[in-house]
Image (tube, rainbow, N blue to C red):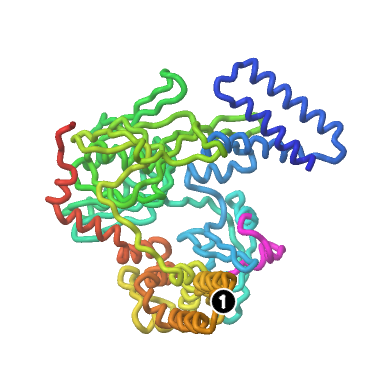
């Protein structure tokens, strides 16, 4: 309890430092109070206090009260921060997953030490060097597998569905580069496709390489789909550079405004563009944020691309890193950004909180109208609203449970163990034979997909009993209803085949053709991509969406 008091007191003292309009005298006073408080507690408190932990907790409490993007990064946590901005780290190169008290390899990256050594998705990590990993969390496994390039690590795994299943690998850590363009290719008749998953230092060059290759290998390229779904953003400078590939040199992409009028900066395209004419559809959704919204918003505001999908996240804040004593970093929000129409797409105003401290999205009724270069109406305050709205189909509880509970993952592991090769990724299909085998792999005794309905039904039954309405006639009706709604797993799986099959296909294909193969497989089932191809094939409709209108 006393330690909690320390943390709260420290948080309060530090929060006072950040109070808007605080004078230098106020800041100095509060820092002196906080410094004295820590010294007194360290000297006189009856038990030992972990000062570093307490102060770090206090700092986090203060920053949480500002916005979720301003954060303190201690020296020991900076490796992950550098990975996000640079797209690289040192390790063995594989994604991992935690389940049932163990950690498994879920996706060795093509060309990485893990992949080259022969580690496979589904391998259970049972030992690292000479330490058993039973009960380890994925964070601990990840930290142990990472390390300086050139150093060695020994990993022992259990490989299911094969004889002599305990295997040991001697791995040499290396610099791992995580591509921000995991896939590009042709997805329709003369329609190119580029998927961008992040904005790192390498992203502009990766996009440039992909776009140039598409144009050179397909001289008749008639349109481009630029997929920014689930792209949480990254470096502002990378976003501006990528936008410049499609805009004339000197085009304004955004303005940033910090504290005071002298902290306003305008970003314009500075390099020769790659293509200013090709029709573009940009795909976005609720996971499209920050730098992704700069690109999609800027190209929408200058009428250079049609935006398709679902409304984006709405992050119009800019962060910068500041060095702190003892090799710490402060990632701090330093500005808001405004795209060419003049609108700020930030969806939440963190400076105005509800009485309980929570924050809310700006309601649509309070947003303001702006106009694109051609006079089309757009709005601020809630992310990027697409020109063509699409919605993801609802996923049933059964389909969700099949994927969440790793039935698809485990079947793909077994399938890969039993089949040495498959057809090319873009030709692979879940046929009737494979589907029947997959269904047979699901144990009805362990697959409890009825749980939600069962709980709701039982709750209703208890209410009826408590209110005194339960008699023989009502009980009989309850029994009849329960029998009517009792699921048959085999038929229910068939009803959900259209939803589950893409997950099953992708998981299997990935075992043979890595992430690029999985993306080549996924585009076959993607309704957003189908809609974008359809639009790009309809030149009249595309032009009508971007047609100039008279401003009001």
Tell me, yes or no, if residue 270 can be seen here: no
Residue 550 lies in the magenta-colored region:
no
Q: Where's residue 264, x and y in %?
A: 39, 23
Q: Residue furthest left?
A: 540
Kindly identify which residue carries mark 1: 160
User: In the rendered picture of this protein, how many numbered marks are placed on residues?
Assistant: 1
Quadrant in which residue 372 is drawn: top left
Q: Residue at x 27, y 40 (%)?
A: 299
Residue 65 lies left or right of residue 365; in this view the side is: right
What is the magenta range?
A: 124-139
Residue 172 against residue 341 in the figure, above or below: below
Residue 171 against residue 50 in the figure, above or below: below
Front position in the image: 156 or 38: 38
Give neighbour class at mark 1: few <14, some 14-19, many 20+ (Cα, 10 Å): some
Q: Quadrant of the C terminus?
A: top left
Q: Residue at x 42, y 68 (%)?
A: 396
Residue 390 lies left or right of residue 418; in this view the side is: left
Q: Residue at x 26, y 37 (%)?
A: 301
Q: Quadrant of the N terminus?
A: top right
| Numbered disc 1: secondary structure | loop
Q: Residue at x 35, y 56 (%)?
A: 183
């Amino acid at each position: 309890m006393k330690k909690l008091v320390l943390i709260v007191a420290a948080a309060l003292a530090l929060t006072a430092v950040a109070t808007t309009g605080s004078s230098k005298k106020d800041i100095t006073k509060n820092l002196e109070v906080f410094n004295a408080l820590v010294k007194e507690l360290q000297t006189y408190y009856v038990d030992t206090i972990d000062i570093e932990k307490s102060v770090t907790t206090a700092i986090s409490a203060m920053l949480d009260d500002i916005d979720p993007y301003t954060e303190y990064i201690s020296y020991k946590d900076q490796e992950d921060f550098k990975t996000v901005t640079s797209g690289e780290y040192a390790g063995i190169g594989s994604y991992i997953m935690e389940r049932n008290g163990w950690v498994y390899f879920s996706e060795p990256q093509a060309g990485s030490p893990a992949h080259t050594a022969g580690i496979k998705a589904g391998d259970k990590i049972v030992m690292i060097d000479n330490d058993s990993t039973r009960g380890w969390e994925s964070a601990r496994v990840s930290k142990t597998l990472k390390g300086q390039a050139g150093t060695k690590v020994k990993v022992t795994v259990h490989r299911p569905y094969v004889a002599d299943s305990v295997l040991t690998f001697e791995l040499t850590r290396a610099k791992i580069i995580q591509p921000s363009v995991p896939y590009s290719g042709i997805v329709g008749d003369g329609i190119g496709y580029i998927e961008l998953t992040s904005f790192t230092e390498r992203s502009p060059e990766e996009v440039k390489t992909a776009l140039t290759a598409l144009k050179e290998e397909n001289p008749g390229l008639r349109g481009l789909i630029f997929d920014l779904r689930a792209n949480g953003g990254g470096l502002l400078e990378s976003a501006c550079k990528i936008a410049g590939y499609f805009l004339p040199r000197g085009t304004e992409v955004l303005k940033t405004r910090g504290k005071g009028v002298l902290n306003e900066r305008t970003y314009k395209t500075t390099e020769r563009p790659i293509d200013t004419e090709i029709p573009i559809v940009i795909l976005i959704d609720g996971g499209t944020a920050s730098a992704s919204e700069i690109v999609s918003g800027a190209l929408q505001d200058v009428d250079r691309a049609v935006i398709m999908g679902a409304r984006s996240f709405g992050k119009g804040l800019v962060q910068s890193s500041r060095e702190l004593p003892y090799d710490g970093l402060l990632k701090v929000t330093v500005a808001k950004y405004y795209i060419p129409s003049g609108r700020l797409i930030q969806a939440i105003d963190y400076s105005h909180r509800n009485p309980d401290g929570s924050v809310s999205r700006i309601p649509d009724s309070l947003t303001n109208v702006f106009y694109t270069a051609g006079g089309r109406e757009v709005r601020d305050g809630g992310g990027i609203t697409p020109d063509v709205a699409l919605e993801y189909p609802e996923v049933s509880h059964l389909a969700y449970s099949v994927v969440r509970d790793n039935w698809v993952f485990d079947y793909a592991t077994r399938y890969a163990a039993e089949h040495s090769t498959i057809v090319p990724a873009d030709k692979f299909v879940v046929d009737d034979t494979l589907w029947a085998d997959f269904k047979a792999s699901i144990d009805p005794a362990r697959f409890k997909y009825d749980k939600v309905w069962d709980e709701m039904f039982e709750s209703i039954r208890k209410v009826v009993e408590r209110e005194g309405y339960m008699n023989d006639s009502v009980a009989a009706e309850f029994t009849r209803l329960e029998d009517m709604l009792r699921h048959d797993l085999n038929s229910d799986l068939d009803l959900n085949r259209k939803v589950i099959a893409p997950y099953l296909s992708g998981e299997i294909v990935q075992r043979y053709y890595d992430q690029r193969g999985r993306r080549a497989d996924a585009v076959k089932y993607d309704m957003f991509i189908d809609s974008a191809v359809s639009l790009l094939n309809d030149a009249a409709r595309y032009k009508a969406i971007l047609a100039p209108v008279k401003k009001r």
